[in-house]
Each structure stands twice: as structure tokens, then as C-alpha cells.
Image (cartoon, rainbow, N blue to C red):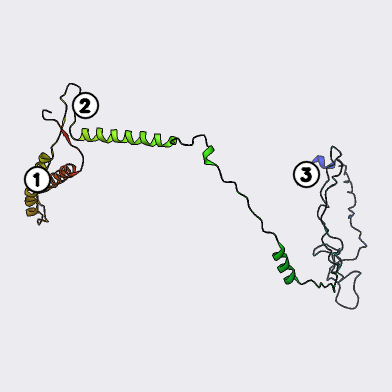
Amino acid sequence: MAESIYNLVPVEIENPAKPKMYRSMHDPKTPVTGSTFGIRGTTQSLGAGCIKKKDTATFGKPPRTQIPDPRTYLKGGDKLSRVPARVEVDEFHYQGERKELVPKRGDRPVMGLKTTKNFITANAVEAILQVPKIKVTEEPDYLKKTDYGQPPGYLEQVKEEIRRENEMIDAYVKEQMGYCHDDNDEPTEQLADDERIALIKALKTKWDAVNAKYQKMTHNVNLDTVGKVKRKEAMESELKALEADIGKLEKPQPIYIKRDC
């Protein structure tokens, strides 16, 4: 450093305060636990090589110190809190006849009891002396009924239903045969039997003619044109219509026609 006049001024040196001495919270005289220091040789330090640990520190309590007592076990309802009843109710006492109590486990049956009764003979005697029961049944007197000698009411209903069905059938037949319901039209007349037979023959003749044409083209499996398909369908529908007309005319029922309709 360079020489300076300030170096001649004495400097006051402050001694730092000495800190408080550290003292451990553990006892310094406690022997070392689990240490291997100083176990060699004949002279060993205090507590060297000794292992000390607390009970239940790592692996639970020592063996055979927690064996459960079989006489002290948790019973049902021990941890339940009983709620007191708000109203005191008198105990129920049964007043009727009670059955005999069930025998206890330790009770022994009475041994050596025997009977001299012959059940076969007793049953035979009881069956012979038994009086048969006679069941008395009173037969009803039909002469004293209120509707005696009168036709039952359901017959009138059956007759009325039959009459209405006949009227409905006649109306349906007249409608199918061309009957006109207008009042201004002329009344219809019933078709005669000879006319019906002649009409049936004519329809059958027409059916034979159409069927002959139809049979000539039934062998054609490949209907490659629209005309062939329509011709076959038309013949089939005509045959069905002729069969339906012939069936209506052959039914045994009157047929009404109107000449001017």
C-alpha cells in the first residue's frame, strides 16, 4: 500500500461478541445405539455395538404380547346407541291359550312307554260302527216358478236376430243382382229358371272359348314382350270374372234383374 499520513491515526479494534455455546437437546451421556464404532479390539466405547429400539417402533409389539382373548369379542349391538322411547308402552301379555314349549336340547324323551292297543282291530270296529252320513238335497219345484208355462225371453231375442239377418241377406242379394234403390225406378223381377240355365250355359261356352285361347299360350314360359304379358293377364282376369258369375248364378237363391236398368 502507498504510504499515507492516515496510517498514523490509531484504529480502534472492536472485539466481536462471542456467540452462545451450542448445546444439544439430546443427552450426551446416552450410549450410542446401533453403532459399529469401537467394536474392534479389547477396549470398546460405552454403548458401542448395542442396538436399542422402542417397542412397536417398526414391526409392531413383541411376539405373543397381542394375543386376542376369545372371551372378549364384539357382540351384536354393543356399539349401537339405544334411543329411549318417547311414550312408555305397557308390555303386551297374551291372554289366549299357549302351545307347549319346544323341548330343550338337554331334555330327554321318556323311554319305555308302550301301548297294548291293536290299531287294526280298533280301526275296523270304528269303520263298522260308523253311521253313514245322508246328504239331503231338496229338488226344486219347477211348477212354482213365476215364468212357468211361458216361453223364455231369450227366444224372442233369437227370433228377432234371425229376422234381421234374413232382411240383411235379402237386401245384399238384391243389391248384388242389380236392384235399384231409387223410388222412381221400375220394380225388379225375379230371373226365371230357364233363363238362368241358358245364361249359365252361355257363360260356360264363353269360358271354354277363352280357356282354349289361354291354353295355347301357357306353354310359352319366356314372355319377352309386353304384349304377351298383358294378353295373358287379360285372359286370366276374364276367366276369373266368368267363374265368379257362374258361381253366383249356380247358387240356390233368387236372382232379381231389371230389364230397363
Residue situated in front as seen by the camera: 180 or 221: 180
Residue type, mark 3 in image: Glu
Classify residue 166 by image quadrant.
top left
Q: Position of residue 121 (x, y in %)?
A: 73, 71
Mark identifier at residue 181: 2
Q: Which residue is mark 1?
A: 201
Which of the two marks, 3 or 1, is nearer to us in this view? 1
Residue situated in front as seen by the camera: 91 or 124: 124
Q: Which residue is mark 3?
A: 3
Q: Kindly identify the residue that appears in the image at 21 percent across and 40 percent down.
A: 253
First along the sequence among labels 2 and 3: 3
Circle 1 packing at 10 Å, graded few (<14), some (14-19), many (20+), is few
Q: Kindly identify the residue that appears in the image at 81 percent across and 55 percent down.
A: 99
Circle 3 packing at 10 Å, graded few (<14), some (14-19), many (20+), is few
Residue type, mark 1 in image: Lys
Of helix, strand and loop, which one carries label 3? Answer: loop
Residue type, mark 2 in image: His
Of helix, strand and loop, which one carries label 1? Answer: helix
